Amino acid sequence: MIALAEINRMTPDAFVTEFGEIAEHSPWVAEAVAKGPHPPLRGTFSKGEGQFIEGDAQPLPFPSGEGAQRADEVPFSSLGDIISRFTQAVMAASQTQQLALLRAHPDLATRAKLTTDSTREQQGAGLDTLSAEEFATFTALNNQYKEQNGFPFIFAVKGATKHQILASFEQRIHHAREDEFKVALQQVCKIIGFRIEAKVTE
């Protein structure tokens, strides 16, 4: 794990190198965080919800060089602040960027090669040990969902069982695309939050 103090000493390039894959195959999210504030979505992160509570929080820019700063000048004040900045970057992006981010995520229960994070997350939910019938169900739902929406079904699987995921899948597949686009982005932000929590220590 990486200490918050160490992150606050990183240059923007070093930060992107370290956190570029936190958002699935989308280093532009970490790059947006490293560039500084995103005024349209100032606020605080609601932990575990992948959402913002509006407020006046204003992230500070990264240091321009090496060396310590005063405590009130560091880029990130807490673990939650890092998660907030990533969520901000996702939610402030263009719809084209957001769609590309959604499409960068793998199908659930896929047998294709996954990133290390995705593999660990899907294994934790038991999606690597599905029966033939369960796998066929997930595959059919994945295909139907992508055909309807143009992006894969996304669910932050940490702490969930395959049965809970399947139940959500069967419910959400009936939603309108516009609603699912919003839900999928929220799930992406949850996934990002979980990954940062697993990587960063205060």
Image (cartoon, rainbow, N blue to C red):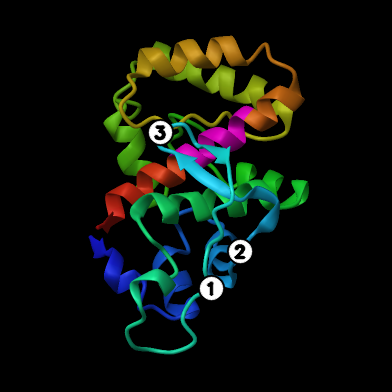
**In this orientation, which residue lies closer to the viewer: 52 or 177?**
52
Give the SS element for disc 3. loop
Residue 183, compared with residue 92, is above or below; it is above
Q: Is residue 39 magenta?
A: no
Residue of label 2: 37
**In this orientation, which residue lies closer to the viewer: 107 or 1?**
1
The image quadrant of residue 126 is: top left
Mark with earlier residue (1, 2): 2
Gap in Å between the C-alphas at discs 2 and 3? 22 Å
Which mark's residue is nearer the viewer, 2 or 3?
A: 2
* 4 displayed left or right of 77: left
Asked whether disc 1 touches disc 2, contact meaning CB atoms under 8 Å apart, the reply is: yes
The image quadrant of residue 178 is: top right
Instruction: Return the x and y of residue 81 as percentages of the image width and height.
Output: 43, 54
Mark with earlier residue (2, 3): 2
Q: Residue at x 36, y 34 (%)?
A: 122
Q: Residue at x 30, y 34 (%)?
A: 123
Q: Residue at x 34, y 20 (%)?
A: 130
Q: Amino acid at mark 1?
A: Pro
* 166 displayed left or right of 35: left
Give the SS element for disc 2. loop
Residue of label 1: 61
Q: Residue at x 63, y 15 (%)?
A: 173
Instruction: Return the x and y of residue 82 as percentages of the image width and height.
Output: 43, 56
Residue 191 - label: none
Residue of label 3: 48
Give the SS element for disc 1. loop
**In this orientation, which residue lies closer to the viewer: 166 or 80?**
80
Q: Which residues are magenta?
A: 183-190
Characterize the magenta stretch by its predominant secondary structure: helix
